[in-house]
Image (cartoon, grey):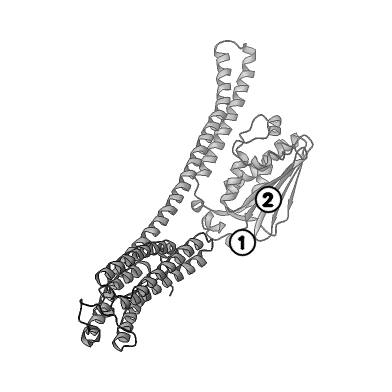
Amino acid sequence: MTEHLPWRAELIDRIQWMVQLRWLAVVGAFGAIIIADSRLPGVLPLVQLLGLTAFVAVYNVFFYVYAHEIRPWSDQAAKLRVATWLVHAQIVLDLICLTLLLHFSGGAESPFTTYYVLHIVLASIILSRLASFMYAGLAVILYSAMLLLEYSQVIEHIHLVAIVDPDLYRRETYLLADVFALATTLFFAVYIASSITSRLRRREAELDGARLALQVRGEELTSANERLQELDRTKTRFMLTVTHELRAPVGAIQSYLDLILNGYVAPEKQPEIMQRSRQRTAELLDLIAELLQLARIRDMDPRRVPLQPVDVVAVMREILELFRGEAEEKKQTVTTDISAEGPAMVAATSDHIKSIWTNLISNAIKYTPQGGRVSITVSADGHEVVGRVQDSGIGIAPESLPHVFDEFYRTDEAKAVAARGTGLGLSITRRLVEIYGGHIGVQSQLGKGSAFTFELPQLAPQASTEPLPAAAEVKA
């Protein structure tokens, strides 16, 4: 399974870090060679040592340039793949060059064997534990191969004169102990370094996950705060609108009463003023009633609405009878068309269905002029009950259509026909339709009439006598 750790994305920086350390090693190697030659003149092969050090400097330049070359790549997968290859190539070359430097500086007699530990610890910090153990094994193999080749005299052993026994590289016990010490040191160093590094990487991954979780949580809180601010703005707008709507009729009633109480109205005119006060009081009561209804609907939990089978057609006919006198007074033609197969039943409350029909039918009659037409249709197809109220009235301007269901909204044409009106009827109607999982829409043309259509889920005939679930469950 491929190891997925956040540190892998930082391999480019790790390469730069290794390049910088290698420059220090090159400078240190040149200095050590010069000092060693001054202390042991003619003993060490300067050409090979300086050439090998120069080779390290050359490939270090290559890695430096290539790391800068791939840094701006936009293909992250390709960048990671090449960066990983560069890290492995550096470690392999370093181990090979270190082994050759040890050979040219005395082999088993060289005091620089511990530099293997430095390279393996670096590998443990940069790479996974498995890769680190593999490179520890490679270092042991390279060092053992060098000792074996010198021991068998396949390659020449360079003796550090006057420092150690000249036959040391041929003493089998010492060589075995030397390899054993190096191997155990390297593997133990890998275990310790990789354990610490793994723990740090896990902690880094946990912190990264916590940071992402906090970021997501912060975004959620920001979104919630924005919603709360919008609700607060909506509440403020609602309160201002309600205050404005209430102030006009109350102010008018107060003015009428002041006129009478202060004696500015002649006795024969007082009934007229009282009638105006009564009309404004009726407007105020209508507004208060619709505000109370709107408040109840807003606070209504659809899951707790008591449901019952309601015949949409029967309710429509009941409401139509209430407004038939007004329609006849205006000499309007009112027609009905019922095309439902059986009862057009829905799961709702009777009062809410009455409110829907009342608002739609009363508006159609109110805003249709003398001699106009109002058409009411109901259809049901087994899945939905569709109610439609169409009139030949004043219509709605295109720019007003998107707002007809907004609270307190009345078109200019509606205000011209009827000064009285709260602008809440259609917003209440839409809310009621949506509570029961339905949809309401409007089509209109200015001066030619409007058509309001609502759709509600139809109640199956066999369910009309069974207990009904809450509105939210019916909607689902």
User: Where 55 sits versus 305, above or below?
Assistant: below
Image quadrant holding the N terminus, namely bottom left
Q: Which residue is mark 2?
A: 387
User: Where 320 sits versus 174, above or below?
Assistant: above
Image quadrant holding the C terminus, namely bottom right
Q: In the image, residue 28 lies at what x, y percent?
A: 32, 64
User: Where 72 sits versus 181, above or below?
Assistant: above
**Which of the 4 image quadrants contains residue 187?**
bottom left
Left or right, residue 284 beside residue 232: right
Q: Amino acid at mark 2?
A: Gly
Element at label 1: loop
Left or right, residue 239 beside residue 345: left
Q: Residue at x 61, y 61 (%)?
A: 460
Q: In the image, residue 32 lies at what x, y percent?
A: 29, 67
**Which of the 4 image quadrants contains residue 332?**
top right
**Which of the 4 image quadrants contains residue 161?**
bottom left
Q: Which residue is mark 1?
A: 460
Disc on the earlier residue, 2 or 1: 2
Visible residue check, residue 340: yes
Residue contact between numbered discs 2 and 1, judged by CB atoms under 8 Å = no
Residue closest to the eye, 248 or 107: 107
